[in-house]
Structure formats: structure tokens, C-alpha cells
Amino acid sequence: MTFHVAYEPGALVNAGHSFDLSYDYESLVIEISQVLAEAEGARFVLGGFGRDPWPLSVDYDMSVFLEQLPDLLENLESRDVFRLDMYSQGTEAKLEFLPGDDDVTITCTSRTSWVPEPSTEHIDRDTLLRMLHELAAGFAHAARTVDPALATVEPFEEWLDKSSPDETH
């Protein structure tokens, strides 16, 4: 299967969490991901390069990916190269996104004994952007569920605004 990434929130409930909204984006993502990992059935799914799915966690691996998501989206939209580092122990891989006119070449380099096969995949640029925006919106909806105040924090507010009003997460 080709490259894909998604967040499945599982049985998410508002358990009265309150986050410090003065934290920077990366710190909020780490804390939110830890809370979201507690939901029964929550999964962070990433597949491709001969591994489907990768053995990833919501609390750590998803936060690593999401810390870099705003920059990845910006670089894809401006058609600039971006290197996403999945640095968590056991995963330790670099994904290089090289946008072309209509597609994106993604190259995976492992820093463990795992060898990606194939090490390079191609995906339609619009498909990849849609997938990443769905990931962002799903995370923002889940964050708002556990703490409604997060709906007013960037980039979560923007991600919620870009998602369709009939979307249910």
C-alpha cells in the first residue's frame, strides 16, 4: 500500500481537561496527544514503504508527526522540499517530501535495521494535501472535544475552520 497517514480518535469524551493555552504549539501537541492516547480505540496510522501500518503510538509518535505538520503543509503548498523526522525510538526514520508539479515524491530513510521497500513512493499532491488536512482537522476536532478552549488556539482554530461543517469526529 502507498503512503497514507490518519488519526482515528476512538471513543473520545470530554473529561474536563484544561490545557495551558499560553504553551507553544509543540508543547500543546505533546500534552494533547497524551490525553488523546487514553481514548479506547485511538490510533495513529501511518503506512507505506512496505510497512502497513508502522508500529506507532498516539501519545508519542503522533505528536512527533504533528509537531512538524504545519511546516510540512506550508512546504507542500509552496512546493518546497521538506524533511519530516520521525525521531522516536524504534521508529527513527526520515521522510523527505519533494513536491513536483502534480505529485510528491516521498523518500524514506531508516535509521534502524528496518529497510524500507520501496524506499521511494509517489503520491498525487492534492491527495496528499487532502490527507494531511484531514489529519489536522481530525486532531483539532479531538483537541476541542477534550478541551473546548483549544478551538480558539492557532493552528487548531484554522484547522477547524477548514474542515467541513458536517464532519463528525
Image (tube, grey):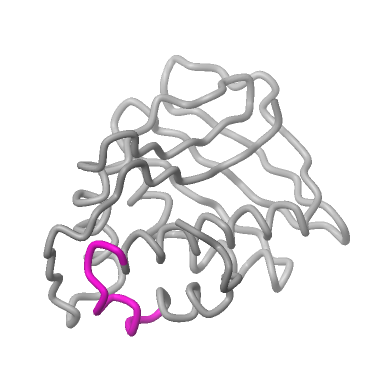
Total marks shown come to: 0
Q: Is residue 71 left or right of residue 65?
A: right
Determine the image quadrant of residue 15.
bottom left
Residue displayed at 61% across by 47% down = 96
Camera-nearest residue between 52 and 49? 52
Give the percent coordinates (x, y) of residue 14. 21, 60
| Span shown in magenta | 145-154
Quadrant containing the N terminus is: top right
Farthest residue to the right: give it.
101
Residue displayed at 52% across by 44% down = 6
Give the percent coordinates (x, y) of residue 33. 27, 52
Main secondary structure found in the magenta portion: helix
Determine the image quadrant of residue 25.
bottom left
Quadrant containing the C terminus is: bottom left
Camera-nearest residue between 26 and 166? 166
Give the percent coordinates (x, y) of residue 111. 44, 28
Whether residue 42 is situated above or below residue 141 in the rendered picture? above
Q: Is residue 61 left or right of residue 118?
A: left
Whether residue 138 is situated above or below residue 47 in the rendered picture? below
Residue displayed at 20% across by 42% down = 38
Q: Is residue 136 left or right of residue 154?
A: right
Task: Based on the picture, tell me whether residue 78 belongs to the magenta stretch.
Answer: no
Give the percent coordinates (x, y) of residue 18. 12, 70
Camera-nearest residue between 48 and 15? 15
Q: Is residue 132 left or right of residue 76?
A: left
Residue displayed at 63% across by 67% down = 75
